Amino acid sequence: MPPNPILICAPSDPLRQQLESLLSAAGYATSLALTPGDAVTILGDAEIDLIVAEGLAVSGAIPTIRRASPSHAPLLVIAPAGDVESHIAFLEAGADDVVAAEFVRSELDARVEALLIRAGRIRTGAPSGQPAGEIIVFISPKGGVGTTTLAVNTAVLLAGGTRTPNSGRDPVLLVDLDLQFGQVATHLNLNPHFDIAGLAADDQALGDAGIASSFLTSHSSGVSVLAAPANPEADFGISVDQLERAISVLRPRFEQIVVDCGSRLDPRTLWMLEQADTHVFVIFPEIAALRAMSLLLGFLAETATLRARSLFVINHIFPKEMLKTRDIENLLRTRPASEIPYTEVEMIRSVNEGVPVVISHPTSPVALAIRQLAQAIIGVETRATPARARKAGGFRIGRR
């Protein structure tokens, strides 16, 4: 059966585009109406499972809209933020639910699905609130430990083996969420003409997947890159809502989305962590870094609603082993998904030349360890990194 058809009634262009983008990204089939009169006409001609309407537009017309639906489709009203009286008025007029205009995607998803379930209208094949595109977030509370290098190389590996036949989706989107000094493009020797700041500032692109895709830069590996801003000052102009709309509009196009969050914790990073399916925490094996990781994990446990599985990666960026792997396992109470060995030359050359090591040296111990991480991400069981590779060490990179 087709996905649930939803009618959006909203004369306000930004709200109408936002609703269409979010609901389409979640897999629903949408129809648009600018006025209550248009909504009544559509309801008489088409099968609609749910109506989402801008409150100020349908104020006084709710009973008329309800009567126009032959199947008695439930009505969700978008009310002005902070106006409690209007919330009550809409409910008294016949709305099934009301949400404030400052809603976030997860709240909209939950309210829409709840109304469909309550009305017995969930269809076979309808979304469960999770759009296409698995999200994998790389983060470390300590900078300079190879987070970007691991994210880039993992994205390249995933792009080479994750496309689902006949899915119609591209393999991997790599998002640089280090919004001040991100270097994903440098690691891939790319010179992007557009970046995430430009996408965030383009309201039309945030509602249109085709336009949003024009802000991406393609790499020969098959990875599409949403680059960090060229100007660090642009960081302050990107809001959580803009990031949410950007990810929502692009997510259905890709099999997987790899996000490099660097080492900065802010509301946008927290939102990204909450959306993720997999967290990859990059660990440098020394006491201060482990303490920072412990603080990060404790903070996330108390303040964020996380549903993702967590993978830990030990990255040996110096030749001398500072802590034993078993000590780290005891502290984290889990085994690392992979252990990246130290290398004298390959990784430095890889970063400087902008060629991922999994391409330039695919059989090296470093590349094999990153491959093990990629396999863990897609759920392939692997044996532990060979002892001789662990003894060799990990990346020697002075920056991310």
Image (cartoon, helix red, strand yellow):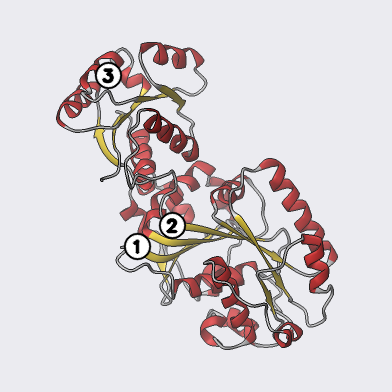
User: In the figure, is residue 319 to the left or right of 187?
Assistant: right
Q: Are marks 1 and 3 in contact (CB under 8 Å)?
A: no
Q: Which residue is drawn at 37% across and 37% down?
A: 19
Residue 70 locus on image (x, y percent): 20, 23
Mark 1 sits on what residue? Answer: 169
Q: Quadrant of residue 165?
A: bottom left
N-terminal of the pair, mark 1 or mark 2, is 2
Which element is circle 3 on? Answer: helix
Mark 2 sits on what residue? Answer: 133
User: In the figure, is residue 238 to the left or right of 253?
Assistant: right
Q: Are marks 1 and 2 in contact (CB under 8 Å)?
A: yes
Which element is circle 1 on? Answer: loop
Q: In which quarter of the image is residue 80?
A: top left
Q: What residue type is labelled 2?
A: Gly
Q: What residue type is labelled 3?
A: Arg
Which element is circle 2 on? Answer: loop
* Residue 66, numbered label: 3
Q: How far apart are marks 2 and 3 (CA)?
A: 35 Å
Q: Which amino acid does label 1 sit on?
A: Arg
Q: Which residue is drawn at 44% across and 74% down?
A: 161
Q: Would you place residue 316 above or below residue 133 in this image?
A: below
- Other-residue count near label 1 (Cα within 10 Å), few / some / many at <14 / 14–19 / ≥20: some
Q: How far apart are marks 1 and 3 (CA)?
A: 38 Å
Residue 28 locus on image (x, y percent): 32, 42
Q: Would you place residue 321 above or below residue 198 in this image?
A: below
User: In the figure, is residue 128 to the left or right of 263?
Assistant: left
